[in-house]
Structure formats: C-alpha cells, structure tokens
Image: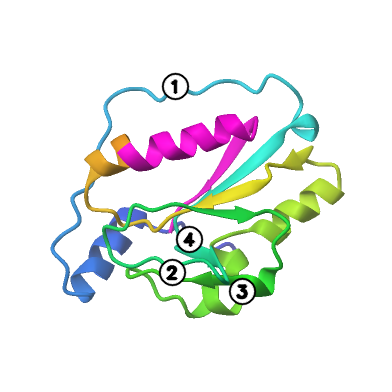
C-alpha cells in the first residue's frame, strides 16, 4: 500500500515548533521558474546532486548553525561510509545509518551503471537547509551552486530537500 504524501510545510512548521524555534517564514515565489527542457536524452546527461540535509564528507568541517550558508563539495566517487550529517532541524538517526535517505548518491551511481543517466558531475553539492534568510540563499547560496553547476557542465540537477 502506498504511503500518503507528506504535507511538507505543515510537517516542518510542527517540527520547528517542537524544537522551540520561531515559526518558519516560508518564501512564496510568484515568478514562474525558468525551467528548460532537456536538450539531449537523459542517458546522455551529466546529473548534479544538490542536497540540503547537512551532508559532509569525513575530514570536512561539519555544518554549524541554523543560518550556516556554507557549501560542501562532495566528490561523487566518495565512499558512502565516509559521509556524515550535521543538521539542526531533522532527526538524523536514519541519515546517519544510511546517508542515501537524504543524499541518494548510491542510487545515482547505480543509474549511471545501468545507463539510465549518462554520468554524474565530479562533485555533489550540499548545504544545511533551514536557512532563515531567504536573501542569503538568493544572494549567496544559489549563485555559488549555480557557478559550480556551470563549471562542472551539469545538464540537470536533482534537488533533495530535507
């Protein structure tokens, strides 16, 4: 039997209240996103993984606080057992047992082996979601990720929110 869909905004609102944080100020965009059709078959595309679950690689600095806007570049050939998580706004128990629940790198590598996708960018990009300042996301985080996507010639990105 299929699971019911997660009511994400209600769930996060309850989670923040449980943690004692002020209510999350959701950003509602009124502009249509600049989506672009794929220019080649998926089996020929380089896919970038972008995740907000606070994943970092052993040896990198953990994420610090709820307004940490830093970015981690994770080599896509990283050993799964070298992945760690640091995040203030979700229960990390399952992610610490299997980082793929918030950072599906093994699934993507399997899709490359099967020929479903053409390949992965050299790095995946991670940050800690739950950043209160939408201005800092818009002016700092998003442009930094965009530049990396261009540098690594990504054809498309898989966004994995937490």
Quadrant housing residue 134? top left
Residue that carries the numbered disc 3 in the rendered image: 98
| Percent x, y of residue 27 | 24, 41
Q: Earlier in the sequence, mark 1 or mark 4?
A: 4
Q: Residues within 10 Å of mark 1 (few under 14, many from 20)?
A: few
Residue 154 sits inside the magenta stretch: yes
Q: Earlier in the sequence, mark 4 or mark 3?
A: 4
Q: What is the magenta range?
A: 140-162
Q: Residues within 10 Å of mark 3 (few under 14, many from 20)?
A: some
| Percent x, y of residue 99 | 59, 69
Label drawn at residue 62: 2
**Helix, strand or loop under label 2:** loop
**Residue 1: in sight, yes or no?**
no
Q: Which image quarter holds the N terminus?
A: bottom right
Q: Is 150 left, or right, of 161 in this rendering?
A: right
| Percent x, y of residue 9 | 30, 54
Quadrant housing residue 58? bottom right
Q: Earlier in the sequence, mark 1 or mark 3?
A: 1
Residue that carries the numbered disc 1 in the rendered image: 34
Confirm or deny contact between disc 1 and disc 4 (CB under 8 A).
no
**Residue 159: in sight, yes or no?**
yes
From the image, state whether disc 3 or disc 2 is nearer to you.
2
Residue at the outermost right position? 114
The residue lying at 79 percent from left, 30 percent from top is: 44
Label drawn at residue 4: 4
Q: Residues within 10 Å of mark 2 (few under 14, many from 20)?
A: some
């Amino acid at each position: 039997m299929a699971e019911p869909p997660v009511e994400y905004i209600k769930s996060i609102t309850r989670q923040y209240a449980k943690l004692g944080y002020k209510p999350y100020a959701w950003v509602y965009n009124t502009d249509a996103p600049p989506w672009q059709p794929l220019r080649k078959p998926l089996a020929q595309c380089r896919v970038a993984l972008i995740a907000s679950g606070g994943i970092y690689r052993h040896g990198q600095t953990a994420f610090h606080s709820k307004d940490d806007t830093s970015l981690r570049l994770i080599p896509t050939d990283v050993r799964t057992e070298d992945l760690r998580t640091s995040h203030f706004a979700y229960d990390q128990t399952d992610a610490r047992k299997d980082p793929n629940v918030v950072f599906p790198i093994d699934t993507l590598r399997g899709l490359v082996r099967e020929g479903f996708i053409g390949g992965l960018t050299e790095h995946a990009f991670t940050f800690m979601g739950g950043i209160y300042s939408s201005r800092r996301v818009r002016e700092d985080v998003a442009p930094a990720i965009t530049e990396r996507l261009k540098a690594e010639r990504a054809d498309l990105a898989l966004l994995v929110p937490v």
